[in-house]
Image (spheres, helix red, strand yellow):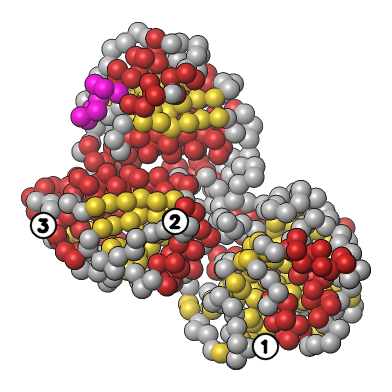
Amino acid sequence: MCGIIGIASNKSVSVNIINALKKLEYRGYDSAGLATINKGRIDEKKCPGRVEKLEKILFQNPSEGNLGIGHVRWATHGVPNEANAHPHSTEIVSVVHNGIIENSSELKKILEKEGKTFKSQTDTEVITVLLTEKLQNAEPLEAVFKTLGLLKGSFALGIIFKNYKDFVIGARRGSPLAVGYSNDENYLGSDSYALKSMTNKISYLDDGDVCILSKDEVKFYNSNKDKINKEIFTLSENKSEVNKGNYKNFMIKEIFEQPITLKTCLKEYIDKIREEINFYNLPIEPKKIKKIVLIGCGTAYHSCLVTKYWLEEFTNLVIETDIASEFRYRNNRFDKNNLYIFVSQSGETADTFAALDLCKKENLKTCSVVNVVESSIARQSDCVLPIHAGPEIGVASTKAFLGQMLVLYLFSLKIGEVRGDLDNKKYKKLISNLKNLPQLIKETLKEEQKIQFIAKDIHNSKGSMFLGRGSSYPIAMEGALKLKELSYLHAEGYPAGEMKHGPLALIEDGLPVVVIAPKDKYFEKTLSNMQEVIARGGKVLLLTNSDGKVISENIRFQIDLPSSDLSLTPFIFTIPLQLLSYHVALFKKCDIDKPRNLAKSVTVE
């Protein structure tokens, strides 16, 4: 979840390190630091808090040097303070680390018995101390390999050495690591996005790889210490501006970008003339699929849950959904006739990547739905379905969620049609209906002022509940997750029919309850559940559509959303929940783009 940067150059690198760290802020972090080789010594500077604070420290006391590493840390071992911030340095070596060393406690006890001392509570400092020990009798590359052999867990490392001012060493196991190329300057980074402002020429380290980065060249070695070559990729240009424009923060900008990003995605996948969905290179012929398994974490998992309803409606297939961190540890019954779909915004989510890796080792058919086509998950998958949402900077996902749902909705239609489970006439009709989706989202965004008023009314509540049935149930879960992420209020999403099986005990006078009730086959039953809430004093916000007119003097708030084909309601009903969470967080003066304790790209278990 942290981010690292390394630069070897023919000029001072500290400014570029700071700029690259700013690109990595979207991941979420609680401290920052850098180290350079300056006048024959390691010049380390770090602090708790934001990169801007580190930048001020450097302004007062600059770090020179043509070689350096930087880091933004999301705390796993030890509280966010200066001692626990990265880099971790001794007199002769400095290390930045993304990941978790699972046997750090065991190694630390051994090293302490040998008389070694530690300045922090982190797992990373064990790497620094081990390297310092190995460097007494080995050259840097050999010392790195010897140290890596002692480590259990995941890591991406950037390492510099006091006595070797010409190169940075990088190493990867589990956590992603990329190399960027330029004239008289080469780069190491946690992802291509951090490097994209400096270069569009990128290579990726695979598990077990080590690289030596100098200003003139990059050398790669595999886990057997053999020198290897790496393919150099040219990153695709992205026209999206990564700035807030006239918006207060990235999240609200990204919410209002959704009509455009959906339109872009539809253009990529739909042939308007033939009214046909184009998917190429699927790893298995649709008629041969026995079961589809959808796997993700957090918001991506919610998109999987919605897709389960679509696939069950449009196909006769058996559909399963699984949380990646659970999937990888279960005793799965794998089948080579199954298709395993992995959903991740960043394409670097550690648990999702590990689940994918497990499937690859079993020679199963895999497909990924990602926003970053150069990501680890995309590169490892048999087939990639990009969501074309453009850069999403806000930690709480908005436009990427709708993008994931849209690609998976198109996938559901296509699989159903190819298999003959979905009537061709209905297939064409559903494709035709999609052309109205961007405008429907645009119309829904006009409810912002009313939602802002509702947010002001409920922002001081101690908690809330979100209820829905059918495909509205995962949307209720997503609405609750957004409110938790952004405002730090307790919120729970439940199937409305489960109210009497426990959650009804939580209803008390004034508790905000969001009821998601499009005019579908569940409508009347959902309204009955809503009345149970009202009878116990709950403060109801009813989201329905113009087909679902409800007259009740006891509903605190009601928002009537645009009508659409019922299969599209998850897209439309998501929008007011995003806006509600945003405005509640705004009233509570929360850090909306960077919620506490959270990260955009979750690269640790």
When the figure is inspected, residue 135 is found, relative to residue 383, above or below; the finding is below
Badge 3 local density, few (<14 within 10 Å), some, or many (20+)? Answer: some
Q: Is residue 18 visible?
A: no
Q: Which amino acid type is shown beneath numbered disc 1?
A: Asp
Mark nearer the viewer, 3 or 1: 3
Residue 92 badge:
none
Mark nearer the viewer, 1 or 2: 2
Is 27 colored magenta in this rendering?
no
When the figure is inspected, residue 529 is found, relative to residue 602, above or below; the finding is above
Q: Position of residue 36 (x, y in %)?
A: 81, 72
Q: Can you identify the residue that label 2 sits on?
A: 330
Task: Identify which residue is drawn at 79% across, 73% down.
Answer: 130
Task: Identify which residue is drawn at 63% across, 35% down.
Answer: 590
Instruction: Find residue 554 and report its image quarter.
Output: top left
Query: Sequence-wise, which precedes: disc 1 or disc 2?
Result: 1
Is 521 colored magenta in this rendering?
yes
Instruction: Find residue 523 and report its image quarter.
Output: top left
Q: Can you identify the residue that label 1 sits on?
A: 216
Q: Which amino acid type is shown beneath numbered disc 3?
A: Gly
Q: Work out how far the residue at label 3 is from the one at label 1, CA to CA, in angstroms.
A: 57 Å
When the figure is inspected, residue 400 is found, relative to residue 580, above or below; the finding is below
Q: Nearer the viewer, residue 14 or 293?
A: 293
Specify the segment rendered in magenta. 519-526
Mark nearer the viewer, 3 or 2: 2
The kind of secondary structure element at disc 3 is loop
Q: Can you identify the residue that label 3 sits on?
A: 420
Task: Identify which residue is drawn at 35% across, 18% down.
Answer: 530
Mark 3 near mark 2, Cβ–Cβ under 8 Å? no
The kind of secondary structure element at disc 1 is loop
Q: Work out how far the residue at label 1 is from the one at label 2, CA to CA, in angstroms.
A: 47 Å
